Amino acid sequence: MLLIMLMGQIAVLGNSRELSSRARISMLTATPGDELYSVFGHSALRVIDPETGLDEVYNYGTFDFDTPNFYMKFLRGQLLYKLSVVPHEYFLLEYRYEGRGISEQVLNLSQEEMQRIYDFLQVNRQPGNEYYLYDFFFDNCATRIRDIVDVQLQPDWGEDPVPEYNRSFRDMLKPYLENKPWASFGIDLVLGLPSDRKAIPWHYMFLPDEMFLAFAQARHSNGRPLVERYSLVLEQTFEPAKPGVFGPVAAGWLLFLLGLLSLLKIRFARVFDKFFFSLLGVVGLVILFLWFLSDHEATNANLNLLWALPTHLYFIFKGNMIYPIGIPRHYFKVVFALNIMLLLLWPVLPQAFHPAFMPVILLSAVKSFLYGHGDAWKRIPMLRRLR
């Protein structure tokens, strides 16, 4: 099989067109869009040869919504992305329609270097070669281009231009999510400890904007700049929508307030608590799924599992807030201790928590205290009246 693949690649190379001396290869960098899949920008390669009329864009960021079990494959980190090749004018048409800007960096390449990259792209576009297993941080539309340039040209990427930033992967996402607070909340919920480790300049390039900067400062081994010239192809006309007033932090504190008010009526409290702890339990199941049944490295070792416990789905229906007894009582004592620990250690936790998690954890602490300490009803006048 390997021999057949190699022979096929050799055949492709044999039929690959020779680029003229007027040909150019450039990197296109698009500004962020409105949809979540486009909010971090995009990168692609353009190959143009005026002598032959060639003008193509090589895009590693395409996927098929009609893929069987699309969402399950996406959640499990098993969704295949592909290299698509379209005429440059079609590529511009899409981004012009979306109002997104495009910058172009023409690479400073010798004829031999240019031909080598072009030949690689011709092999990569062949049926059976165009698909790859997408990973948001380590194998995406930007890193694919970075890797091609690194392998084919072996440039010097230079030092970290802003070493004082000391940014984690999670930190690098935040500027792109300022106008999408709910998306930021969801991403912080599912990302685990791997997202909080410090990124290095090589890793920065998972973001197209960062790769644009890295290409601008990179040099060939002989010292000549990697980028020959820069131009603005499309100006951005799209204006991101302003976030609504009711964001996840407000929702979290509203939930906390409702949880306290539920204590005024014991029947309401029982209904509210079953909903609240069941919701946390379902969230915990999602976190467990992404940790153990997904290939996404970034969702491993998620400390949110310390407050979103799947076991809530069992014990909230076994526990009794008025007369706590047996194992459920001890269970909620442990939950209370975990909640207090998280709140006290909040500033020094190795994983960054979204601010909206605080009122949720605080409410969980209040409720679990009541389920774990039956004598609380004797000490708090308001609660004693409920009893």
Image (cartoon, helix red, strand yellow):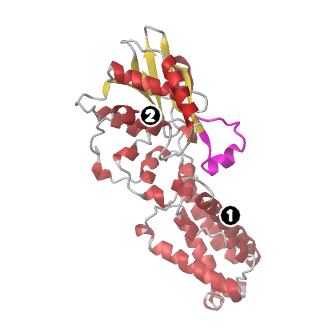
**Quadrant in the rendering for residue 382:** bottom right
Position of residue 17 measured from the top left corner of the image (x, y, whole percent): 47, 15
Give the residue drawn at x 50%, y 33%. 239
Q: Which residues are magenta?
A: 61-80
The mark closer to the camera, 1 or 2, is 2
**Quadrant in the rendering for residue 272:** bottom right
Vertical position of residue 346 compared to residue 2: above or below: below
Quadrant containing the C terminus in the rendered view:
bottom right
Q: Is residue 71 magenta?
A: yes
Vertical position of residue 299 compared to residue 52: above or below: below
Q: Is residue 266 magenta?
A: no
Would residue 198 appear left or right of 360 to someone viewing this image?
Answer: left
Position of residue 296 measured from the top left corner of the image (x, y, whole percent): 56, 52
Residue 246 in sight from this viewpoint: yes
Q: In the image, what residue type sits under mark 1?
A: Val
Instruction: Rate crowding at label 1 as few (under 14), some (14 to 19) or many (20 or more) other CA atoms within 10 Å.
Output: some
Vertical position of residue 17 compared to residue 357: above or below: above
Quadrant containing the N terminus in the rendered view:
top right
Q: What residue occupies the far top of the structure in this picture?
A: 51
Foreground residue among 324 and 172 = 172
Residue that badge 2 annotates? 145
Residue that badge 1 annotates? 282
Q: Secondary structure at mark 1?
A: helix
Position of residue 354 measured from the top left corner of the image (x, y, whole percent): 50, 59
Would residue 16 appear left or right of 212 to someone viewing this image?
Answer: right
Give the residue drawn at x 64%, y 86%. 330
Q: In the image, what residue type sits under mark 2?
A: Ile
Mark 1 and mark 2 lie on one chain; the one further toward the N terminus is 2
